[in-house]
Image (tube, rainbow, N blue to C red):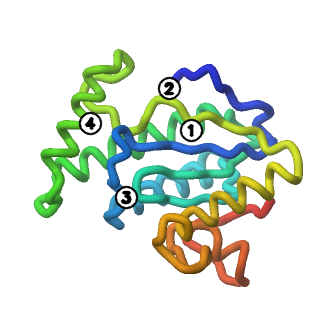
């Protein structure tokens, strides 16, 4: 997961994106999105992840995160490592996944083409963290993240998308994950 881009100060919120190799729309299936939710919850409860905003799109995930007790790069590593193993296993074990062979072939090819992996690669290598050290950067990235499902045509309003923190920001309701507002 080495990258020329590294997180700055861990206590400052960072905008981060993980993308599925080949931009495969894995997260068009709800049960794969639930694996991401569970991984984020675990990191919140056990690894010091502060989740400020999030959205799971069909082939990528946007997060705004920080931490006081860990390193952002370690959290990203753990989230990506756990979720990739769980999602690959869920695809491999599925009896109903119509795209199973096709997806596993792509993940296998990507894994064999990357010396950092043995078998499969689910996530693209980099995640290009952007330190949100100004109010303008925070607002721009927060709006971008929450508007993503609207721009993609999934919903009419940001707070209607279930797999996002928009409901926490636009309404008095709470979404699937605990959010610490920016």
Left or right? Give the position of 27 relative to 133: left
**Does the residue at mark 4 contact the one at mark 3 (Cβ under 8 Å)?**
no
User: Which callout, 4 or 2, points at the residue further toward the start of the chain?
Assistant: 2
Name the residue carrying label 3.
27
**Does the residue at mark 4 contact the one at mark 1 (Cβ under 8 Å)?**
no
How far apart marks 2 and 3 lie (CA) works out to 21 Å
Name the residue carrying label 1.
76
How far apart marks 4 and 2 lie (CA) works out to 16 Å
**Does the residue at mark 2 contact the one at mark 1 (Cβ under 8 Å)?**
yes
Q: Residue 25: horizontal and vertical position, in percent? A: 34, 54
> Where 8 sits versus 169, above or below?
above
Q: Nearer the viewer, residue 172 or 78?
A: 172
Residue at x 59%, y 74% (from the top left corner): 175
Q: Nearer the viewer, residue 75 or 19?
A: 19
How far apart marks 2 and 1 lie (CA) works out to 9 Å
Residue at x 16%, y 50% (from the top left corner): 100
Left or right? Give the position of 53 relative to 77: right
Query: What secondary structure is marked by label 1?
Result: helix
Left or right? Give the position of 136 relative to 153: right
Picture disc at residue 1: 2
Quadrant of the image occupied by residue 82: top left
Q: Which quarter of the figure is the C terminus placed in?
A: bottom right
Residue at x 47%, y 50% (from the top left corner): 60
User: Which callout, 4 or 1, points at the residue further toward the start of the chain?
Assistant: 1
Name the residue carrying label 4.
107
Q: Residue 46: horizontal and vertical position, in percent? A: 59, 48
> Where 53 sits versus 171, above or below?
above
Query: What secondary structure is marked by label 4?
Result: helix
């Amino acid at each position: 997961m080495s990258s020329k881009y590294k997180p700055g100060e861990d206590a400052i919120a960072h905008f981060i994106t993980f993308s599925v190799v080949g931009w495969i729309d894995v997260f068009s299936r709800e049960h794969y999105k639930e694996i991401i939710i569970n991984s984020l919850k675990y990191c919140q409860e056990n690894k010091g992840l502060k989740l400020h905003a999030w959205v799971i799109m069909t082939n990528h995930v946007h997060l705004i995160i920080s931490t006081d007790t860990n390193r952002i790069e370690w959290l990203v590593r753990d989230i990506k490592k756990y979720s990739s193993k769980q999602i690959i296993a869920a695809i491999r074990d599925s009896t109903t996944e119509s795209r199973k062979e096709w997806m596993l072939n792509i993940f296998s090819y990507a894994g064999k083409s990357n010396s950092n992996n043995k078998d499969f690669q689910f996530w693209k290598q980099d995640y290009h963290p952007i330190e949100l050290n100004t109010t303008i950067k925070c607002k721009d990235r927060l709006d971008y993240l929450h508007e993503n499902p609207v721009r993609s045509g999934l919903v009419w309003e940001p707070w209607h998308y279930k797999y996002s923190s928009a409901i926490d920001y636009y309404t008095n309701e709470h979404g699937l994950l605990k959010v610490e507002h920016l």
